Image (tube, rainbow, N blue to C red):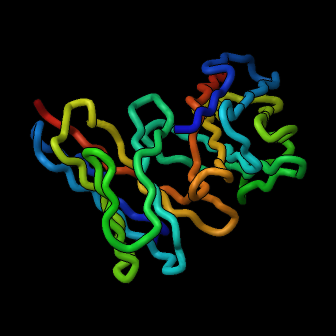
Amino acid sequence: GAVVSQHPSRVICKSGTSVKIECRSLDFQATTMFWYRQFPKKSLMLMATSNEGSKATYEQGVEKDKFLINHASLTLSTLTVTSAHPEDSSFYICSARATRKSKGEQYFGPGTRLTVT
Amino acid sequence: QKEVEQNSGPLSVPEGAIASLNCTYSDRGSQSFFWYRQYSGKSPELIMFIYSNGDKEDGRFTAQLNKASQYVSLLIRDSQPSDSATYLCAVERIGNKLVFGAGTILRVKS
């Protein structure tokens, strides 16, 4: 299957600081990447859709100025959590849609566990 | 009504048995359906995808789709303890977004 990496896998930061998370598709090109967050024992919540070369599309209720998304190339998208607060602590997962594969299924990165103190 | 519904479980099956996981969806226009497996503390892993009515088999896994009944299922044959995980059903909608069910916890007991 297709491989998607995320970095860092874990990060602890202080309240008020910003954290950048990288998502890379390693063996395929992804014109579309997605960012999710997941709270313990809950399902995935889509935050935004990231399209290469254009602005991200945010889901209702997600602050675009707080969660900055950049999709600079066909293999890299970044999510920056700005002015992080303890309530932003969560498991952030990206996925990449393999548009040149059979039916455009999404492959997930390993996730980034963010803890804001 | 939720867009994608799954029984939260847990579904407990003995080792070697068939595990049957079910999912219903509300959007009759949905075309693409996916099953993901998620171990605790890990990200989802794609297991199967299905687009046409009927069955699709891959190793021990069989996905079944019935668009008329808006129903998709996943069968796991010869269940192993390593299959114990949460299984997420996902339906693709406009904008290539996936809508996930809440997931079914599967426990395979040895």
Instruction: Say left or right for A5 vs A19.
Output: left
- Number of residue marks: 0
Who's the residue at 72% across and 59% down the image? A60
Who's the residue at 68% across and 49% down the image? A47
Q: Position of residue A26 (x, y in %)?
A: 67, 30
Instruction: Say left or right for A61 vs A80.
Output: left
Q: Quadrant of residue A66?
A: top right
Q: Is residue B94 above or below residue A41?
A: below
Nearer to me, A96 or B56: B56
Q: Is residue A100 above or below residue A90?
A: below
Nearer to me, A103 or B6: A103
Farthest residue in the bottom direction?
B68
Instruction: Say left or right for A66 vs B77.
Output: right
Q: Is residue B110 visible?
A: yes
Q: Is residue A70 visible?
A: no
Instruction: Say left or right for A34 vs B87.
Output: right
Q: Is residue A16 above or below residue B64?
A: above
Query: Looking at the figure, which quarter contains the C terminus of chain A?
Result: top right
Q: Position of residue B24 (x, y in %)?
A: 37, 69
Who's the residue at 49% across and 68% down the image? B3
Q: Position of residue A45 (x, y in %)?
A: 58, 49
Nearer to me, A43 or B109: B109
Who's the residue at 57% across and 58% down the image? A103
